[in-house]
Amino acid sequence: MWVVPAVVALVWTVLDGRVIVEIDHDELAELLMELKHDLGKHMLLPVSILPADATDAEVRSALAAALRRTRPGIAGPRSARRVFQDFRQELGGTTFPGLPEIEMALERALVWDGMVDDLSGGPLERARVTADLRAVGEAIGRAVRMLREDCGGPG
């Protein structure tokens, strides 16, 4: 656990030349940790728990679950894309170091969604799928560390 200094620095957004305070570090850290749980864990889990000798059909089914039914909930499962859209909505217009990296990693992972049902390209490369899904959680983790370091807490 890290401790935020008494004066909490804020994350800023520049809109039409005006600086608007959107969200403080604590709130952003909480949102990022939720995102890491939802995308870093729930998106990777279906593929990562497959046995080493899983068939291509099993990999495709797990990948579909990972990307299309990422986060279970009372209102039904949310896709990885929807989870991230909800995160961005909670942020409002706030940006922070690491956000572009998270977006790029997620977009790379979401490319696989178009390949789940397309059998014409042959079997999916499970190692690449896993690496791309894992990269999303890693990018979020780096953003969390940057935020903590910015607040003076341990990285």
Image (cartoon, rainbow, N blue to C red):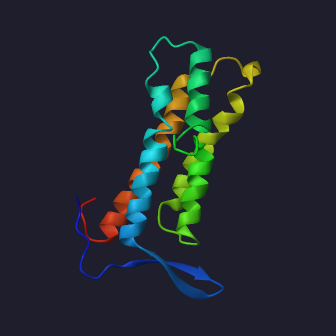
Q: Is residue 122 left or right of residue 31?
A: right
Query: Given the current orientation, which residue lies at the most extreme right position?
Result: 120
Q: Position of residue 90 (x, y in %)?
A: 54, 65
Q: Which image quarter holds the C terminus?
A: bottom left
Q: Quadrant of residue 113?
A: top right
Q: Residue at x 62, y 88 (%)?
A: 17
Image quarter (top left, top right, bottom left or bottom right) of the N terminus: bottom left
User: Residue 19's image quarter?
Assistant: bottom right
Res. 31 in view:
yes
Placement of 28 over or under 140, stated as above or below: below
Asked whether 144 or 34 is in front, the reply is: 34
Residue, x 48% and y 42% (percent of image)?
A: 135
The residue closer to the viewer here, 70 or 25, is: 70
At 39% from the left edge and 54% from the top edge, which residue is drawn? Answer: 33
Q: Nearer the viewer, residue 60 or 147?
A: 60
Question: In the image, residue 114 lies at what x, y percent?
Answer: 71, 34
- Horizontally, is 31 left or right of 151 in the view? right
Residue 83 position (above or below residue 148): above
Q: Residue at x 47, y 38 (%)?
A: 42
